[in-house]
Amino acid sequence: MSAGPPLLELPASTVVAGLACDLLDDAARAIARLADRRDTEAMHDFRVAIRRLRSSLRAYRPWLRSAASRKIRHGLRDIGDATNTARDAEIQIAWLEVARGSLSRGERSGLNWIVRRLRETRRNAYASARQDVRESFERTAETLRARLAEMSGDSPPLRAPLAALLREHAHDLAKRLGSIRSPGDKKSVHEARICAKRLRYLLEPLRRETADAKALVRSFKAIQDLLGELHDVHVLEATLETALDEASREKAAHLRQLAFAGDKSVLQRERRRDERLGLVSLAARARTQRDELFGVLEKQWLARRAKDVLHEVNRFADALASADSGDEKLPVERERKYLLSTLPPLASESPSAEIEQGWLPGKQLRERIRRMRDDGGERYFRTVKLGSGIERIEIEDETTAEVFAAMWPLTRGCRIAKRRYRVCEGDLVWEIDRFADRDLVLAEVELSSADQEVGIPDWLTPFVVREVTDEAEFQNLSLASQAA
C-alpha cells in the first residue's frame, strides 16, 4: 500500500481493493514459479495468497459489491481447493521421511510403499496446477482486477466495519474453540483454525500501524499454526487408514496370484514381507503426535490463553469503534426482545454463561454490576443504560473482582440471576436468557440500526409468544425490582 493517511481512516473499499490487487500480484508471481520443479515453496506461497484474498473478499463483500460477487468468490475457492491434494501430499511426504529413521527394516517397506504413491499423487497434482489451475486463476484474476479498478471510495472508513468484523470473528472463534472436546474432534479443530486464520488476516494490514494489531497477529498465527498441525495429522491419519485398506487388497491379490502360479518359495517369501506392518506403525506414531498436539492446545489455549486473547481483540475493536463514533457521541444499544414459551432445544446445545447482576440505588441513574461465569472463568462489568424501547444509550466497562465484591452488597433487593445462551444466525447473534428465580425465558437480538428488519429464525419461531421490546415490565431492571 502507498504512503498516505492511516489505513483506518481510508474507505474500507479502497483499502481492501488495494490489498486484493497486492495479493493477486503475489499469487501470479507464485504460480509462475511452479514451472521450476526445484521451487518447493511456490505452491505454498500461491495457496497463502489465494487464502488471504478469499478471506478479504468474503469479509468486506458488502463494501466491494460486484468485485466480491459469488461467482468470483466461488472461482477462487475452487482454485484453492484444486491445490489441496498437492499440498497435503507434500506435507505427508515430509512427515514420513522424518519418521523413516525410527522404523525397523521390515517396517520401511510399508513406508516406501506409501511414499511412492504420495509422490505420484504430488506429481499429478502439480501437473494439474501448472496447467488447469493457472488458466482458471488468470481468468478469475483478470475479471477481479477489472472490477477492483472500477471501485469507488463510497464506503465507511476501515475502522468501522473492521471493528464489527473483529467482534464477529472473535465470538465465532470462541464458540469453535469451546466445541473442541477431544483429540479426535476433526471438524471443530478445522473450523477453529479457519476462524483464527480469518482474524489474523483481518489484522495483518495494521501490523505497521498499531502495536496492538502486531501483538494480536502473533497470537493468532501461533494458534493457527498449532491448529494447523493438528489438522494435518487428522488428514494424515485418514490417508494412512485408506492406505492400509489398499495395501490389504493388493497383498491379498498378489498372494492369490502366487498361489495359483504354484511357486511355493516365492509365496513363502512374500508372506514374510508385509507393507501393512510399517503402515500400522506409522498410524500409531500419527496417533501419538495427535494426542501430544491436543495436549499442548488444551494446556496453552483452551484453558485460558484463548479467552485472554479474544478479550484483547474485543478491546481493540471497542477502541476502533469508539474512535469512529467521535468524542461527543455515546454508544447506543439497539435490540429487540421477545417473550418465549420455553427454552428452544437449539439454544440449550449452544455456548452459555451464568449471569448475576444487580442495580445500585438511585433515582435518575441506575448503575448495574454483573458477574459472568463460563468455561473460561469469571468476568465483571459495570454498566449504565439510559432510555427505553428498541434504542438505548449503553455505557459499559469491564471491572475487577474486588470492585464487584465491594459493590455487590449495595444491590441487595434488586438482583436477577439467569443463564444466557448465544446462538449465531447469519450476521446476527441471538441471546436467550432463562431466568433462575422465575419461569421466564426471553430472547434478545442486537441490531445495527433501529429500522433493521429482523426475521425470526425457524428454530426460534415455534417458541415466540410475542415481541416485548416496548414493554417496560420485561426490562431487566423492572424484573429485578419485581423480585424484591
Image: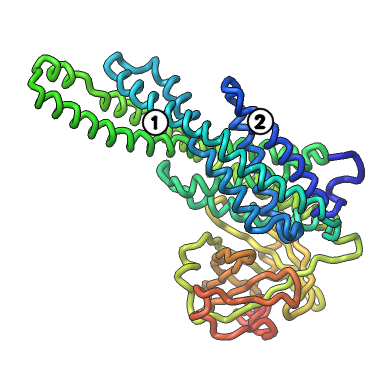
Residue type at mark 2 is Ala
Which residue position is annotated with label 2?
A: 32
What is the distance, in whole Å, between disc 2 and disc 1 at their CAs? 34 Å
Seen at 59% across and 64% down, the residue is: 355
Asked if 146 appears above or below 458 in the picture, the reply is above
User: Do residues under tags 2 and 1 come within 8 Å of each other at their CB atoms?
Assistant: no
The amino acid pointed to by label 1 is Ala
Quadrant (top left/top right/bottom left/bottom right) for the C terminus: bottom right
Q: Nearer the viewer, mark 2 or mark 1?
A: 2
Q: Which label number is shown at residue 63?
A: none
Relative side of 303 to 60, left or right = left
Q: Total of numbered circles in the picture?
A: 2
Q: Residue at x 43, y 20 (%)?
A: 97
Residue 419 placed where, x, y %?
A: 54, 67
Residue 416 percent coordinates (x, y): 60, 72
* Residue 68 visible in the picture: yes
User: In the displayed structure, would residue 459 be above or below residue 399?
Assistant: below
